Amino acid sequence: MAIYEPEGNWWQPIHKDEKIWFILALIWMLVSFFYMPIQHFIGKQNPPTESYRVSAEDFDGLVEGMVKKYQIGTTGVDNDVPLVQPNPDEPVFLRASMWEWYPALRLEKDKTYKIHLSSMDLLHGFSIQPINLNLMVIPGYDYIANIKPTRTGDYRILCNEFCGVGHHTMVGKIEVI
Amino acid sequence: MSEMRTCESTGLKIDKTAENMVMLNVTTAIIFLAVGGAAALLVLLTRWPAIHLLPVEWYYRWLTAHGLVALIVWILFFEMALVYFGSAILLNTRIAVPILSKVVYGLMLVGVTLVAGMVLTGNADVLFTSYVPLQAHPLYYLGIILTAVGALLGFIHFFINIAVAKKEGKYKKTLPLVSFGLMAGCIIGIMTLAHGAAIYIPTFLWSLGILESIDPEAYRLVWWGLGHSSQQINVCMMVAMWYMTAAFLFDAKPLSEKLCRTAFVLYILFINVASEHHLLVDPVLSTWHKIVNTSYVMHLAVLASMIHAFAVPAAMEVALRKKGYTNGLFEWLKKAPWGNPGFSAIFISIILFGFLGGITGVIFGTEQFSIIRHNTWAITGHFHGTVVAGTTIAFMGASYQFIKIFFRRELIMPGIAKLQPFVYGLGIMMLSICMMAAGSFGVPRRHWDYNFSDAPFGYQFDPTVDVFMSLTGVGGVIATVGGAMFIVVTLGSIFAGKKIEK
Amino acid sequence: MSDDGKFEAPGVFTLAIIFLVTFIIIWLAHAKWLGDIWELY
């Protein structure tokens, strides 16, 4: 039994049912594994792979540069975050900090944007709702996501990485037209 | 030389010191489970929208405490008991270095007390993961380091014990399967705590101002080498408890020792990777790195779990069929001793770990699926399916068996004991499924207010979410009742149960 | 300990197949849900 040292030669052939189960389980495990690399060639949703180190000041400069160039209005809410409609051929910079997403974005459907994500202070979680697209935002790093909105609408960016007592107030906005 | 006694029901020759250490650690573990469970109740009543119990700071504070005590402290003390069980008692031998077992216990107790003190006084509002640049008081990190050093010495003690046992001829060529599984856990444990040292010592120095900064992404990578691997210790030891139960209760033999031992070797080889499934939507790491790591190398360690989850019930089925329950496919299962909480907890653990925790773990740990689940409440639902419905319920089942064998007490309130695994299992199952449902709609984890009051832009989840948030609360309350039943029955039996004269 | 073609544990084998089928179904559901979100590279 399992609580005693096994007697004699325990390296014996496996019974039929355990053997069949082992083979079925192995096949399914390999399928679920190979799905991952294959998706990088044929799939349309893959975690982004481009990132760089960046200082908070430098990233903030890039954000403000974009806002200055492409701001189309304000959002008129408590933190009065600017509304920006970037050119799809130019990089988009989104800044996370305690406790806002800056700026608010207006994007065009079926255009692919290079969105740069970074944080000014702690870790934040970039979570687009209601589609439930989630990425990490790390201070000191620029994470570049190539995103193509496929449906119009008014979306929210939640923060889903704990960042202090104001964590639940950290909500941003993306409009897709 | 300490005294030995012979256990009549198992035939084991039990060393008194080893037995005392098992009893001390099991009792301590259960007390901490009560604390972790109380913290769970506070937190779940806060996320239950109709109640929203704690104010914002205390929510995150008790959430930190809940993660540490329920996920680490309860389980680690229980695992120390299993170290002595697997390396001394199952080998009919003594603890090699009795003073070391006391040092281990002392370090862990002091460390945990320091951590609890820091958390509850608001000096460590950093959550269980303490992600840099969040910073806690230096004594918080010191407390964790002391606890980790204690546990590390405990895992090392396992190897000292089996080396001495081998030398004294207590086993000839190979350990009993249960000890083999516990050994796999100890190997992973040493690796886990090495990661822990690598991350907590620099972070401690940073909190003192000696180191200027810690890279946040490096922290995440190394921390999860501690964080996830610690859960894999749990998997090995939980599985070892499954085999132990089959042996103790049914005289059941694994169908193939070869297959089971190979499965534990797969764990040792591949379970040490996989931590990067926490980093699938992080910058810095390359795709190939993420894929090979998150899959535990082509899902081979998952295959090992699937082998064990078949082998253990199969061994029980064979043993019960031999007893005469051969009618149809499931007579053996219907006639199994469901009135014995030592059995029912273990079987519930096998089913729930597989269906709730295992399936969702592989799925959420798939690089692409992580995009739609990372940091949502679905993740929380997943790991309550593994470490609570799996490991905790299994350790509950083991506790009932240990009360009979080591504490040599009858269970008090046998009617309550009989129901306990079912109540707890039902509660956790409901909690886990409803968390995953809410998370699939985007509800964040570790979040005080899913209605986003005081946020500049409002957001309303699909109204179905409100139902799942409330049902999670209901499941959690049922689980709390089941947990309280466990605490009362076990501590009551340990201290006041009728003594078994043998 | 030889393989004589008989199932030693037909009950558990049945449960295991149910598990595998459940696994595959839930996995496929997630593949479908993933396909519904925006494109991301």
Image (cartoon, coloured by chain):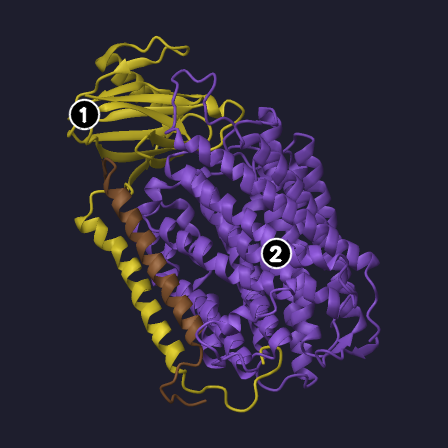
Q: Residue flagged by tag 2: what amino acid is it?
A: Pro
Q: Which mark is residue B84?
A: none
In terms of depth relative to the viewer, which is nearer, A34 or C35?
C35
Q: Residues within 10 Å of mark 2 (few under 14, many from 20)?
A: many
**Hue of chain C?**
brown
Question: Of discs 1 and 2, which sits in the foreground?
Answer: 2
Task: Report the residue at 59% width, 55% height from top.
Answer: B422
Image position of A3 (left or right of B386): right
Asked if B86 appears above or below B71 in the picture, the reply is below
Estimate the x, y position of residue C22 in percent, counting from the top left. 36, 57
Q: Label 2 lies in what chain? A: B
What element does badge 2 sit on?
helix
Gap in Å between the C-alphas at discs 1 and 2? 59 Å
Estimate the x, y position of residue B32 in percent, counting from the top left. 70, 48
Q: Which mark is residue B421?
A: 2
Q: Residue flagged by tag 1: what amino acid is it?
A: Glu
Task: Report the residue at 44% width, 52% height from top.
Answer: B275
In terms of depth relative to the viewer, which is nearer, B419 or B424?
B419
**Hue of chain B?**
purple
Q: Residues within 10 Å of mark 1 (few under 14, many from 20)?
A: few
Quadrant showing the C terminus of chain B: bottom right
Q: Which mark is residue A90?
A: 1
Estimate the x, y position of residue B294 in percent, counting from the top left. 38, 54
Estimate the x, y position of residue A85 in percent, counting from the top left. 22, 17
Q: Label 1 lies in what chain? A: A
